[in-house]
Amino acid sequence: MLCNAVFPSTHKKSVALISFARTACSIGLLFFSSSAFSQENESCSTLSDSVTYQAPPVFTEKDLGKINISADQTRSDSQGTSTFQGNVVIEKHELRITADKAAYNQNTEDISIDGNVHVDTTNMAIDADLGRLSKEKQSSFFEGVEFQISKDNMRGKAASISADKVGKTELKKSSITSCNLKDPDWRLDADNISLDHEEEYGSAEDVVLRFMEVPFLYVPYMEFPIGDRRRSGLLVPEIGYSSSRGTELTVPWYWNIAPNHDAILAPHLMGHRGTQLDTQYRFLTENSHGQMDAAFLHKDKITDESRHQIQYQQHTKFTRDLNMDIDIQDVSDTDYFNDFSNNLSTSSTTHLKRELTLNLNKQYWRSHLLAQTFETLDTNILNTDRPYRRLPQLTLNGDQPITDSGLAFTLDTELVTFDHEDDSVITGSRFQLKPGLHWLSQGSFWFIDPAIKFSHTQYEIEDGNGIKQNIEDRNLSMTSLDAGLFFERELDNGLIHTLEPRIYYLNVPYRDQSLLPNFDTQESTFSTALLFRDNRFNGGDRIGDANQLTLALSSRLIDSETGNEFLRASIGQISYFEDRQVSLTGIIENDNTSDLIAELAAKLNNWGMSASTQWNTDKNQTQRGNFLLHYQSDSQHIFNLGLRSDRSINDEIRQTDLSFMTPINNEFSAFGRWNYSLEHDRDIEAIAGISYDSCCWSVQFIAQRSLKYTNNIEEYDNAFMVQLVLKGLGSVSGNKVSDTLEHAILGYNED
């Protein structure tokens, strides 16, 4: 006989069953979907599970409180116990419980479930031999449990799971994995797991991590978070090898100081160097956040010296418009980054900045206060050639509309005091005031923007002996005219083709500036942006004389529906009507035209290409050139080819850069990078590696060879790293491989 019962939400039995169902289903849900495990895994369609999942029913709003019960047979006795037997199904909103037998006591409102117990919730399934639910004690107990969380691809088993009314859950003799339960490649076993859902933390006793049935890690006792709350404890160790540091092992310990303060203390063992302590401290307040990273090595086995590195960064927002930034760095010696960094860009650092910045931003105005010093790491740089300190620098910049017709008042002003580590060089202050007017007028296919500025600069300086120097003020006018057209047409294929000519005229009279000091000025690298700038120098000590006209042309292919650019091309050149007499070297520039600048960028499906060139028309050769070809269809199919050349510097640069990631088959992938100097016929950086990725774990092996400079001597540092990821647990060997590949391969992302 098939028995169906539908209880309204006000019925006594219904209330009991809802309470029990919530208690039972929270057991696994609050633990295994929590932050105790990362969600890096991908589901495997071929993975077979002993626990099957079927989505529970979703009731309409008016039926949310109802429960449906069906069984082959049902009967009640005189003691008030109702028994359901044979294909028992209990359903409510987003919950289904099935069993061979269920008994409900109307007096105690207890329920017991026996035989092939199965529970389905919105994201997990539970199989159990039997279960008991107590309304009076607000507790639940399941025995002989297997579970699966389809969302996270996690599964496991436990001898028993129990939960009580105070929000605590215990798992006895439990095992967790993201592999097949019948023959898991890895699993995490624990004799006892206790979960406190109120405090959002858990503890485990006698924890063993096994990989290929080999015990990988044993912890007699551990605590972990099961929610957003952080807790102190050990993090994943990192291992690796470097020819400059030897075998490396880092064991980080996380310290949850307070809800808005935390730290990491990580002993870093290096076979060739010794034991270094790596630390990180972070804080967060209502208006500020910051971080301090520090490393200290008491005695380097190679140099026999103490080594350290410190960086402190802070951002504070006082009001919506006022904020402050602090960035302070320090290292013990010039070779620190060469000896301790795997990042090629970091190891080539020549200066460390130390600065405090105060920014005030209004609608049309910006004010900037800066105190800045430098630590020079490159010992080849003479003391007199090292950068000046700004102690301090105050700037005020604005672009204030005067009328609705486009007329606006501009102002660039600066007051800065320069100091230097070498007492023999001149020091002093510089004041600049540059007011101006410009009038932007534009239509649907054109714009014109004439501007006029007046620049006033004055100095107060003294030489290395403290004797003040008389420097004549610099005053000059600057006029410019910027104008452009915009034409477009729709092609037969639906794309929009644009043609955008632009002209820019600049006139700045010559003023002899050879007697002015040079605190911070350099000649700008020639680029597309320089075609439309009013000064060819960076810094305020030189203003270039100019009587020149820039002609530029851009063209684009645009998707009319999405606005995406498929193709962009531009070309531009400056024509000079007079020689440029202001220079840093004293050499007058008398070329009639500048180098020709051209850029091209294209994107089609998974392919992208960008190229730029600076062509010297007098020498008929490329001064600078860059080319990049990029392909990426997904995270496993990546190809990059880059070319770079630069003849504008003393040590000419000609480099190739090749990187890729490609699958070999369904489980193995290969990746690599080769950065090569054609000019010097040598490797700059070479990376090669292979990865294996299964349904529940992955491993990456990487070998790295990097060119470094130690004591002005070129040498290669060879490193070997491995990263083992147990899906669901995360990396058990640190993240150095992922960090290295993200830096080396454009488009690589571990996620």
Image (cartoon, rainbow, N blue to C red):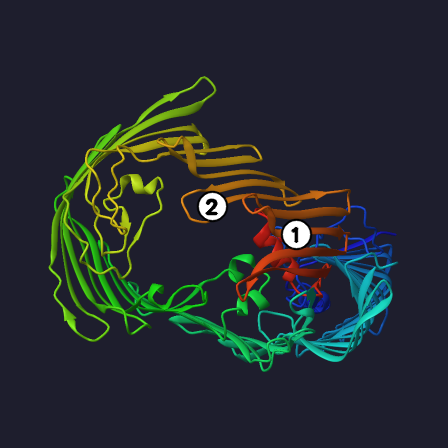
Reply above or below: 337 against 68: below
Q: Is residue 281 visible?
A: no
The mark found on residue 715 in the picture is: none
Report helix, strand or loop for mark 2: loop
Question: Residue 62's x, y, as percent?
Answer: 59, 53
Which of 230/526 is in front? 526
Q: Tell me if 613 is positioned left or right of 16 in this view.
A: left
Q: Dot 1 lies on which element?
A: strand
Q: Considering depth in this image, is 452 or 614 the residue closer to the camera? A: 614
Which-is-in-front pick, marks 2 and 1? 2
The residue at 45%/63% (across/down) is 350
Whether residue 736 can be seen here: yes
Q: Mark 2 — residue?
A: 652
x and y percentages locating residue 540 in the rendered image = 23, 56
Report the residue at 33% width, 32% height from top. 572
Q: Badge 2: few (under 14), some or many (20 or more) residues near its Cα, within 10 Å?
A: some
Q: Amino acid at mark 2?
A: Glu
Q: Earlier in the sequence, mark 2 or mark 1?
A: 2
Disc 1 target residue: 687
Query: Does the CB distance between marks 2 and 1 fall below 8 Å?
Result: no
Image location (x, y in percent) of residue 525? 35, 46
**Which residue is nearer to you in this view: 180 or 350?**
350
The amino acid beneath tag 1 is Ile
Using the rendered view, name the quadrant where residue 363 is placed. bottom left
- Seen at 27% across and 55% down, the residue is 539
- Residue most extreme to the top: 492
Residue 120 in the image: above or below residue 279? above
Spatial distance from mark 2 to mark 1, Cα to Cα?
24 Å
- Say if 722 sits above or below 586 in the image: below
Q: What x and y, as percent, mark residue 497?
A: 40, 24
Nearest to the observer: residue 37 or residue 550: 550
